[in-house]
Image (cartoon, coloured by chain):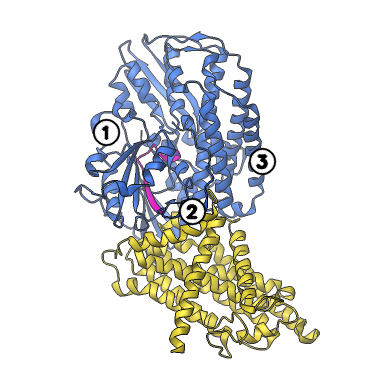
Chain colours: A yellow, B blue
């Protein structure tokens, strides 16, 4: 019974979180900025999609096409389990929580590739190849960026990583790691400016080009929720998770996550959409060497300063 | 016309007014005359959003007129919409399309029985109609043959180990990279474009033949449709040709007035192009700034003339200071300074340079060989590197210069009252050019002393650039090819003729 309640609670949190991301996006978006519109527009968009018919393109791969959004949302729900929102407030706490989180991100990209491939359209195929490029470009930098907090905390447990930041947040002495983590997080969540796999003007909607109605809504929900989870993990790894004075832990966690999400979304607006090869070059020529430098720096600091701080 | 359209001031409203509002997402089809209108519509209301896939839309906006060749693609787009869906027809030429022969355009009402229709002269009217599609009848599409789904054959290729498989990506005819429909067959090796074939003619209107079949007065209306996005340039070329045939020289002040009207049209074209370009490269700050600038300029332009230039740039009209309306010098100066500031900032914008620098380079000698000797494309190659970024900056420089020129001319108000010549056109032949927003628009007009033109030939900048596309896009990356294509600002109605 507890498991079912936990699962329902996580799904509810993801839906609300996804809505929150949509609200922030609306507040940052171009056009008449009305607070009322920002809060109600995501609901109107959801209602519109729910009213629409669910179309499957001719000669598409039915199983892959229909299952892709469910794979995406399942992955997101599983990943959410290891995010600690407060002391002892976590879906489950394996000793390898961070490893579990990073490994489970890959099937999300697979879901995106399935969505593009199954459409039996050339635009979808090109978008699939781009999604595959994303998969190989984020894995290594995000893993290396996350090693910094692991080295400092001497643990892969997400709860332990938060607890080890009780004195000083890791962002203070691992800012490079945070930047690498956030850029890689944008890769994984197909966010602007790394959104060429679902780019509107280039490939007519990319991997989502043939999706409509409830399935499209499910995909959008999964994408927003994934971004929220990546920002939450950023808070866990670099901003001391739930820790903070006066307010309860979950409130601190929520405030930090919302602030980080809004900041990242605002910063990403400043760039035009990048080409996939520019993204790959950024990953292999900049992020990878920088993440290695970060590991060396963190290692030296951890050895020189007791507790690494 | 864009210049006569007056955007409404934003109204403030409380959050409760949004309760119960429905969101509508649309895909748009531009028959060739609606690029600026569609750019104005996008981003006007948060509950009216543009999407690129018909699967994500519940509304199809069709900017008419639509050519016979484009009709099957329009029908295919409508069929791809998910239900419930609706169609809204917008007349962008304000009825001028009826001046063309009947067989030129398809009857869109027959294709979509029961579709709503609005005139294209007011964005607010279009928006007010488009936000309530549930009041119209549901989408109904007439039976029409599907568009040609065949593609082009792949070229022979020597089999190599580890060679990738080539693919043909059909881009268009309905795509956002040109103002109007154009189809490209891109032969791609992965993300690299190896070669391409261009298929134009989707906005073909037979302007020249139509002008040769009517009298001098009727040909004047058609001349404004040489480029529907720059009607003043086309009409002015025609009027100047008539004046030269009649051996009549306009005064300096009339010439200045005409130049100001054309400069305003150029500046508006360049800013609405920038809005579309920023949308294509998904640069939100640039989009926001250019949209505000273009909207502000459009608003100012609506009060500059007491009567729109098309009504007084024609024979037998008395032109004097009466044609000039209200000039708010402070607002004009603010726009000119904003444009200048934007140009300087974009020169050092590293993010923009990432997507636009060093791609789509056109050398000046190549342009000269093709006969392109002025306009923003030539200026970008002549004074800059000739790449996409240079073209963007060149357009902004021209727009800034034009706005200053308009200020100078209109603030002086040294306009003498003058009557232009009549419609008695003697025998003769004339060739001339005017500086349109996309380059020099040339006109070759022959009169045999009859009631109408004996020969009309337009030299159209978009058509000239279209011929350069295969060599320009070959070897580029797919994502770059689309940015390069957008940077040329091809107006397909003008390009197809």
**Secondary structure under the numbered disc 2 in the rendered image:** helix
Crowd rating for badge 2 (residues with CA inside 10 Å; few <14, some 14–19, many 20+): few
Residue nearest the observer in this picture, A94 or A32? A32
Q: Chain of mark 1?
A: B
- Where on the picture, by quarter, is residue A119? bottom left
For the question of whether residue A126 can be seen, the reply is: no
B264 shown above or below B83: above
User: Does B192 sit left or right of B200 as displayed?
Assistant: right
Residue B375 is situated, as x and y percent measured from the top left of the image, at 53, 33
**Secondary structure under the numbered disc 1 in the rendered image:** helix
Quadrant assignment for the C terminus of chain A: bottom right
Residue nearest the observer in this picture, B456 or A297? A297
Residue A97 is situated, as x and y percent measured from the top left of the image, at 57, 86
Q: Residue at 51% across / 79% down in the picture?
A: A80
Q: Chain of mark 3?
A: B
Q: Are marks 3 and 2 on the same chain?
A: yes
**Location of mark 3 (residue):** B341
Q: Chain of mark 2?
A: B
Residue B358's disc is: none
Disc nearer the start of the sequence (3/1): 1
Check contact, mark 3 vs mark 1: CB within 8 A. no
Disc 3 versus disc 2: distance between alpha carbons? 39 Å
Disc nearer the start of the sequence (1/2): 2
Magenta segment range?
A: B23-36
Residue nearest the observer in this picture, A167 or B12? B12
**Location of mark 2 (residue):** B16
**Location of mark 1 (residue):** B104
Check contact, mark 1 vs mark 2: CB within 8 A. no
A216 shown above or below B312: below
């Amino acid at each position: 019974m507890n498991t079912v309640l936990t699962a329902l609670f996580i799904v509810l949190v993801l839906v609300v979180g996804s809505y929150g991301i949509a609200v922030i996006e609306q507040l940052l978006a171009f056009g008449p900025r009305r607070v009322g519109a920002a809060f109600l527009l995501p609901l109107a968009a959801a209602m519109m999609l729910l009213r629409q018919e669910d179309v499957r393109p001719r000669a598409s791969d039915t199983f892959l096409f229909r299952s892709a959004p469910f794979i995406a949302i399942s992955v997101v729900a599983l990943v959410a389990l290891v995010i600690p929102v407060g002391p002892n407030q976590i879906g489950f706490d394996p000793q390898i929580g961070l490893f579990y989180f990073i490994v489970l991100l890959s099937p999300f990209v697979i879901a995106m590739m399935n969505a593009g491939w199954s459409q039996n359209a050339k635009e979808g195929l090109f978008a699939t190849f781009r999604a595959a490029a994303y998969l190989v470009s984020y894995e290594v930098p995000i893993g290396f960026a996350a090693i910094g907090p692991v080295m400092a905390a001497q643990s892969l447990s997400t709860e332990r990583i938060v607890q080890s930041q009780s004195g000083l947040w890791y962002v203070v002495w691992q800012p490079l790691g945070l930047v690498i983590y956030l850029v890689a997080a944008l890769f994984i969540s197909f966010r602007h400016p790394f959104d060429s796999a679902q780019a509107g003007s280039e490939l007519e909607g990319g991997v989502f080009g043939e999706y409509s109605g409830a399935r499209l809504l499910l995909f959008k929900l999964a994408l927003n929720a994934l971004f929220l989870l990546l920002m939450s993990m950023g808070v866990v790894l670099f901003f001391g998770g739930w820790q903070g004075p006066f307010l309860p832990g979950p409130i601190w966690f929520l405030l930090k996550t919302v602030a980080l999400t809004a900041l990242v979304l605002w910063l990403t607006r400043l760039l035009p959409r990048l080409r996939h090869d520019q993204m790959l070059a950024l990953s292999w020529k900049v992020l990878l060497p920088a993440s290695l430098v970060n590991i060396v720096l963190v290692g030296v600091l951890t050895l020189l300063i007791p507790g690494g701080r | 016309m864009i210049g006569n359209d007056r955007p409404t001031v934003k109204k403030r409203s409380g959050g409760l007014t949004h309760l119960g509002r429905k969101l509508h997402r649309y895909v748009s089809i531009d028959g060739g005359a609606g690029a600026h209108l569609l750019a104005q519509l996008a981003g006007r209301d948060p509950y009216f959003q543009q999407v690129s896939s018909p699967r994500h839309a519940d509304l199809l906006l069709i900017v008419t007129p639509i050519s016979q060749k484009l009709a099957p693609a329009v029908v295919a787009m409508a069929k791809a919409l998910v239900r419930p869906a609706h169609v809204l027809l917008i007349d962008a030429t304000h009825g001028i399309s009826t001046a063309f022969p009947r067989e030129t355009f398809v009857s869109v009402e027959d294709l979509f029985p029961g579709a709503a229709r609005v005139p294209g002269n007011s964005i607010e009217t279009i928006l007010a109609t488009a936000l309530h599609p549930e009041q119209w009848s549901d989408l109904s599409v007439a039976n029409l043959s599907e568009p040609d789904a065949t593609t082009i054959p792949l070229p022979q290729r020597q089999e190599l180990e580890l060679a990738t498989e080539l693919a043909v990506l059909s881009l268009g005819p309905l795509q956002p990279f040109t103002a109007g429909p154009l189809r490209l067959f891109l032969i791609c090796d992965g993300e690299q474009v190896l070669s391409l074939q261009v298929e134009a003619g989707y906005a073909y209107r037979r302007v020249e033949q139509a002008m040769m079949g009517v009298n001098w007065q009727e040909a004047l209306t058609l001349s404004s449709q040489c480029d529907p996005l720059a009607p003043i340039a086309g009409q002015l070329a025609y009027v100047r040709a008539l004046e030269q045939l009649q051996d009549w020289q306009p005064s300096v002040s009339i010439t200045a007035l005409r130049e100001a009207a054309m400069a305003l049209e150029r500046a508006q074209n360049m800013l609405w192009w920038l809005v579309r370009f920023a949308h294509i490269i998904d640069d939100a700050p640039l989009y926001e700034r250019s949209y505000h600038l273009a909207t502000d300029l459009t608003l100012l332009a609506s009060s500059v003339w007491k009567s729109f230039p098309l009504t007084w740039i024609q024979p037998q009209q008395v032109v004097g200071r009466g044609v000039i309306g209200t000039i708010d010098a402070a607002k004009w100066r603010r726009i000119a300074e904003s444009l200048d500031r934007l140009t300087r900032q974009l020169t050092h914008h590293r993010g923009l340079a990432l997507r636009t620098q060093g791609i789509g380079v056109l050398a000046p000698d190549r342009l000269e060989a093709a006969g392109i000797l002025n306009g923003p494309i030539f200026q970008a190659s002549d004074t800059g590197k000739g790449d996409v970024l240079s073209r963007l900056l060149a357009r902004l420089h021209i727009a800034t210069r034009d706005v200053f020129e308009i200020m100078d001319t209109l603030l002086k108000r040294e306009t003498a009252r003058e009557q232009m010549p009549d419609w008695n056109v003697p025998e003769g032949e004339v060739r001339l050019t005017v500086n349109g927003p996309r380059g020099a628009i040339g006109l070759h007009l022959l009169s045999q002393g009859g009631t109408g033109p004996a020969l009309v030939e337009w030299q159209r900048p978009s058509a000239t650039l279209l011929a350069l596309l295969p060599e320009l896009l070959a070897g580029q990356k797919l994502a770059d090819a689309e940015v390069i294509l957008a940077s040329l600002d091809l107006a397909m109605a003008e390009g197809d003729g």
